């Protein structure tokens, strides 16, 4: 019997994966959350790995000599050593098409509105018995506001549509992979990266995490933003320099931030964003709905099924 290992299990159950892979004489074994999965992988010698945020590098690959495919539950694959996997003939695939663009863009809008209207702090103050507190803290107007997107794939475009629906007049975009014709048809305007920061009233991050995008939001760029601006990150934690962002919030260089993703997850107790003012945080949950998780699990399992029947994965991201 073949073994399929699930690193960092976190879903309610794995019946979807078992049903998809039922015809392959495969046993699906979740490996509990642990700092070192290598001994378990050596014992199981899996032909396939399903992973969420766990790092898959040389040690993990060495522990799986018969490994054929690694599938990331989700879009970003920065936690997987794709080049080493390719050299060993191991497919790496992601699941970009599980339909979470609506959930993620909705969450981006929710974080923005929570920060803009100070919903979390207002809730706490009312529960303390305070009243009539609205005018003690400023809430800037967003009339004719500009949304700035860093990254403009399906999720970025869905986010732009939602912000347009609540009255944002203009969307500017930094995305070197978006061509001008596609930008025009989506009613967004391409700009240079450093031109985006001083113009945008809200900056929403939707780029993949790569060496080029790591800390793309840094102290220098934060200093060029409007003091009334808001940052939203529902993509990858490493896109923002968290210390610089927290410092900008404490110093009043920007108005607020809505953050769903962090460089280290679960978020560390000493993360500076936990104590930053006018900041709304969530637990990397922007992608989630009952519908999206069901589709995600099925599509991930179907990629493994393709490989086990001798085909390449549909969303093969380390082509050799």
Image (cartoon, rainbow, N blue to C red):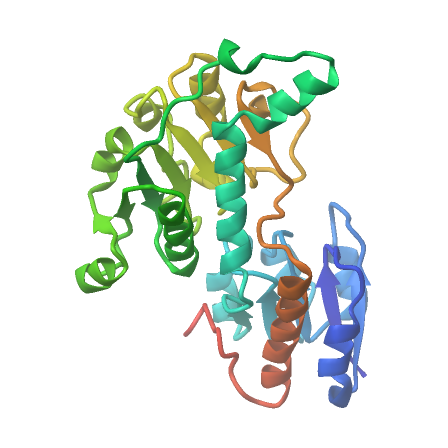
In-image side of 138 versus 46 (left or right): left
In the rendered image of this protein, does residue 46 appear above or below residue 288? below
Q: Nearer the viewer, residue 25 or 226?
A: 226
Q: Mark yes or no: residue 217 visible.
A: yes
Indicate the position of residue 41 as horizontal and vertical percent values.
Answer: 75, 63
In this picture, is 2 found above or below 81? below
Residue 40 shown left or right of residue 254 in the figure: right
Quarter holding the N terminus is: bottom right
Report which quarter residue 129 is drawn in. top right
Considering every residue shown, the one lying at the far front of the view is 132
In the rendered image, residue 201, in percent from the top left (x then y), is placed at 33, 32
Residue lying at 48% horizontally and 51% vertically, measured from the top left: 105
Which residue does the image show at 31% across and 25% down from the upper left? Answer: 225
Image quadrant in which you'd find residue 131 = top right
Q: Residue 215's spot in the image, x, y percent? A: 40, 36
Dividing the picture into quadrants, the one containing residue 296 is bottom right
The answer to whether residue 65 is visible is no
Q: 79 or 122: nearer the eye?
A: 122
Whole-percent x, y for residue 96 in the image: 50, 66
Q: Is 58 in front, or is 245?
A: 245
């Amino acid at each position: 019997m073949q073994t399929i290992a699930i690193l960092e299990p976190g879903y309610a159950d794995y019946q979807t994966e078992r049903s998809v892979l039922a015809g392959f004489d495969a046993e699906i074994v979740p490996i509990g959350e642990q700092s070192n999965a290598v001994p378990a992988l050596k014992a199981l010698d899996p032909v396939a790995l399903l992973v969420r945020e766990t790092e898959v590098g040389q040690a993990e690959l060495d522990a799986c000599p018969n490994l054929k495919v690694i599938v990331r539950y989700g879009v970003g694959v920065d936690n997987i050593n794709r080049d080493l996997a390719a050299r060993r003939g191991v497919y790496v695939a992601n699941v970009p098409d599980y339909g979470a663009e609506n959930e993620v863009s909705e969450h981006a809008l929710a974080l923005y509105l929570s920060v803009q209207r100070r919903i979390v702090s207002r809730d706490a103050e009312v529960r303390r018995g305070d009243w009539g507190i609205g005018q003690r803290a400023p809430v800037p107007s967003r009339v004719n506001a500009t949304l700035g997107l860093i990254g403009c794939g399906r999720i970025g475009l869905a986010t732009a549509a939602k912000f347009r629906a609540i009255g944002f007049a203009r969307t500017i975009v930094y995305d070197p992979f978006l061509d001008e014709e596609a930008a025009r048809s989506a009613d967004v305007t391409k700009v240079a990266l450093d031109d985006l920061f001083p113009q945008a009233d809200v900056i929403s991050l939707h780029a993949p995490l790569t060496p080029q995008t790591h800390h793309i939001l840094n102290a220098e760029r934060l200093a060029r933003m409007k003091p009334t601006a808001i940052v939203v990150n529902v993509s990858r934690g490493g896109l923002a320099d968290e210390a610089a962002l927290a410092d900008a919030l404490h110093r009043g260089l920007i108005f607020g931030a809505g953050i769903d993703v962090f460089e280290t997850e679960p978020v560390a107790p000493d993360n500076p964003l936990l104590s930053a003012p006018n900041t709304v945080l969530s637990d990397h949950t922007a992608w989630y709905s009952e519908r999206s998780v069901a589709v995600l699990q099925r599509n991930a399992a179907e990629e493994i099924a393709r490989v086990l029947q001798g085909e390449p994965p549909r969303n093969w991201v380390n082509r050799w």
